[in-house]
Amino acid sequence: MTGELEHRRVKRFYVRTNKNFQFGLQIARHERRERAVNDPRRQIPSQQPPSPPAAMVSDNGRLSHPRAKSSHAPMQLDPSEPEDLGDRSLLNHTVISEERRNPLDIHGFVYDNADDPALTDFIPKLHRHLYGRLLGPAGTPPDKNLVPSRSDLASLRIRHNRLYMHRRMLVNYTSYDMRRDQDTISPRCHPDVMLLAEPDSPHPYMYARVLGMFHVNAYLAGHANEEATLLQVLWIRWYNFDESSPWGPESGRLPRVSFAPLDDEPFGFIAPDQVLRGVHLIPAFAHGLSDSALPGYSIARLEDEEDQDFSYYNVGIFVDRDMFMRFLGGGIGHRQPGGPRFMYSQLFGEGQSPEDHPDGEPMPEEDLQDEGDSRLPALDDAQLFEESDEDEPSVVLDPDLIDEELDYGYILSDGRRRRGRGGRGRIW
């Protein structure tokens, strides 16, 4: 600072003194120290960067190498920073920001992570996903049976060849009791989601981990409308359902999943509208860690994680009532028919429902009226609608108590009890 602003530096040094009569000497000492620290002749010459530390032995006896930092920006952004989500209407199933503050060059991103297995066929998979989204109706996932040719994919155009990354996604859904609910999905904090599986799948739902969320401006060259369309995309890593592990009330276990191996196309893209809601996956600590599904370093893991994943995860079906009703079935707010069929197979046998006989035939009426049957009376039972001829038992009250209540106005003059606030009192 020079000139008129020099007095500010002196006042800044004065705050560091003890404010006694020798403050001038103390200010001079602070000024000399600052000048010595900032003297370029006293700066330590730059040294060679330290060599990476050697591999360390982890608790499970395996060698753990320190994670190398990627030269490119990661897909996971800091969720604590603010982000404008725009229209947060509850009528939209998903809400993602449309800001362009965090652009990512597609080819540069793939080039910087060329050795990462998670980036294998990243661009072809992205192009096939976007091509299917542009051909189908707005807001619908791409057709799985669509296999575009190379000439079809050559017509795809992405504006500036960029992805625009985002921090979070809001998922609005209807709960089992017809109420509105919302989940927040973030690649760093709450990355796991559930999707509706195919009708012939061994499990009613599919599970995936969101690695990144972004939007692109794309269009198809040569079509009637070449105006760029904003498409929001989720980059995910699939879980495989473990069919060898029993689950349900009979076994007393939760459904178990694990990360898909590399030979099973574990990475891909989905539309945000395919997500049902977030899911809570509990690591199966007893089975330990493993890198068999994704060996080595990968940006598919967080920076503070080791280069390993848990071998198995348990699906938390009791995390809330809505999640449990998705597996039990019967929720009037759930339109998917998947849950009841799988839970009934655990309770009543394969292909059975509560109204079916163990042999698969409807249970006869006479079997429902066996002796010792502890079922609740049905609504059409005649005795429920028959009026009883017996008089209600009379209650003998203390005359002094009646007089006291009458004085305070609790009992009206005709013998009826006054109704309390909120309509909770009774009138006799």
Image: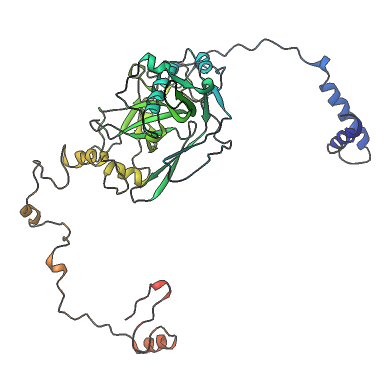
Instruction: Answer left or right for 24 relative to 269.
Output: right
Coloring applied to the structure: rainbow
Instruction: Answer left or right for 154 relative to 98.
Output: left
Give the percent coordinates (x, y) of residue 246: 25, 32
- Quarter occupied by the C terminus: bottom left
Q: How many marks?
A: 0
Give the percent coordinates (x, y) of residue 132: 37, 25
Residue placed most toward the observer, 299 or 20: 299
Q: Is residue 148 above or below residue 187?
A: above
Name the residue rendered at 93%, 33% in the picture: 25
Q: Is residue 268 visible?
A: no
- Quarter occupied by the N terminus: top right
Instruction: Answer left or right for 330 relative to 134.
Output: left
Q: Is residue 410 visible?
A: yes
Give the percent coordinates (x, y) of residue 95: 47, 39
- Residue at far front of view: 224
Name the residue rendered at 57%, 28% in the picture: 102
